[in-house]
Every structure is written in C-alpha cells, then in structure tokens.
Image (spheres, rainbow, N blue to C red):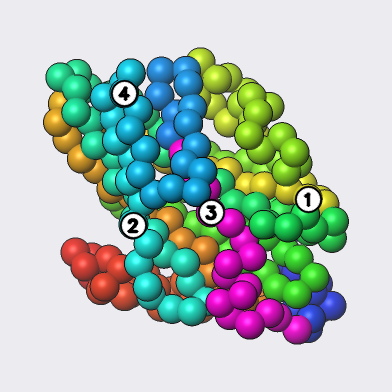
Amino acid sequence: MNLTDSQKNKPSLEPQAAIDSLQFIPGIWVNGKYYWLHNCTEKVIFDEELIIRVKNEPIHSKIRFSSVFVSNHSNHRKEIKVLVMHHYANIKQDNLTFVSPTDSRIFHVADKGIFLVNGKFDEFGMKEYTTIPQWSAYTDKIWSSLLKGSLKYQPMTGGPAASIYAIRMSLVQHETRKMNTWTIAGSSKNELISMEQGLLKNTLAFPFEK
C-alpha cells in the first residue's frame, strides 16, 4: 500500500514525542491463554513456570528497540507465542493501521507521523499479524482460534486501531530465548525503510549478525 502525497508532506512530531505516542504492549500466549504486560517489563506466569522480560535498548530518538526474553523454568518443552501490540496512547480518529504483505511490516499512519513496526526471531521476521479496532485490543476478538493461538487476520483498520503480531517459540526445559521488536517514527515510508536498514546493520542491536 502506498502512502499519499498529503500524508507524506504532513509535519511530524518531535522524535521522542512521536515514538512515545505509539504504545508498545508485549504479551505471551501459552496453552490457550494469553497475558499482557501492562506498565511492567517482567511477568511471571506461575501456572506455566514461565517468565517474560522486556529490555529496552537506547538506539536512536526515532527508534524504540526492545528485546523480549522468555524463560522456561519447567521440566517440559513449552510451545508459546510472543505477542507484540501497538496502539496510540490517546484515541486518534484519523488513524490508519495496515499490514503490508509485500514489505512484511506493519504501518500506523496518523495526522502528524508514520510508524513502522517490525520484529525478528532468529532469522525469521513477522509471519502472523492483524489489525483490530482499539476497543477490541484486549478481548478475545483478536483470535480466530484462542485454543490454537491463531490471530484473526484483518490487514487494515481505520480510526482508533491496534496492531498485533505473534512470534512462535519452542523452549526446551530451563531454556531462555530472545526476540527483538522495534518501532520507527518518521514522516515518510522511504525514511522509515532507510532507518530500518541502518538499524539492521547496527552491531549494538544485532551483535552476532553481519
């Protein structure tokens, strides 16, 4: 999907104000249940013997880069999904949120800026994602099958909206695994893609990749 010239030419917010206006809410799905980390960076799921922890890395004023760690403290393999939700801190009626299948990225377009949302686990990027009205964000309406952990596929939502993507993980007993997620604020799609390319080459963000 191409952004219109009018959207491209609208002034953007100050970098830090812009990146903070789109909230990042991590979560986890396991065994037909899901949990969100509201206003915290660590959550213990006692019934599953899992811990999810989020670490934010200072990369750039226009980039929110986070590492999500999941630790399996049980004596059994765990099949889980890390959930990554984004929505505006304030309700915005003129928002457009959409998934770009050709780019394998999510975009949030508002009156004063554009956001790119993406993530990576091992060598794999986003494969399962959806957009939904913001008032449905924390309900079972996000799922096509809660039992299987399958998100309801909806590629575009206008008005107040949230985006969610899921990354599948398999953890053996007493294993910790990590995935990365990032949000980039800008004024045009080309700017966002260019900044992301620079991020992916950043050895501080991806120290073991060339």
Q: For the residues carrying marks 1 and 2, which lies nearer the camera in this image?
A: 2
Residue located beneath label 3 in the image = 24
Q: CA distance from mark 4 to mark 1?
A: 34 Å
Q: In front of the other: label 3 or label 4?
A: 4
* Circles 4, 1 touching at the beta carbon (< 8 Å): no
Left or right: where does residue 101 sit relative to residue 6? Answer: left
Looking at marks 2 and 4 on the same chain, the residue that comes earlier in the sequence is marked by 4
Distance in Å between CA atoms under marks 3 and 2:
12 Å
Q: Secondary structure at mark 4?
A: loop
| Residue at image location 51% in from the left, 15% down from the top | 147
- Residue beneath disc 1: 160
- Look at the numbered disc 2 and give the secondary structure of its residue: strand
Residue type marked 4: Phe
Give the residue number, with chain letter if any, for mark 4: 46
Q: What stretch of residues is rendered in magenta?
A: 11-27
Disc 1 marks which amino acid?
A: Pro
Gap between marks 1 and 2, in whole Å? 27 Å
Compared with 33, 5 (above or below) is below
Residue 125 appears anywhere in the view:
no
| Residue occupying the point 58% across, 19% down | 145
Mark-to-mark CA distance, 2 and 4? 21 Å
> Quarter of the image containing the C terminus?
bottom left
User: What crowding class fits label 3: few (fewer than 14 Cα within 10 Å), some (14-19), or many (20 or more)?
Assistant: many
Which numbered circle lies on residue 147?
none
Picture coordinates of residue 193, whole percent (x, y): 54, 73
Q: Quadrant of residue 16?
A: bottom right
Residue 43 in the image: state x and y as whole percent: 37, 38
Q: Vertically, is 13 above or below 56?
A: below
The picture places residue 195, in percent across and down from the top left corner, at: 49, 77
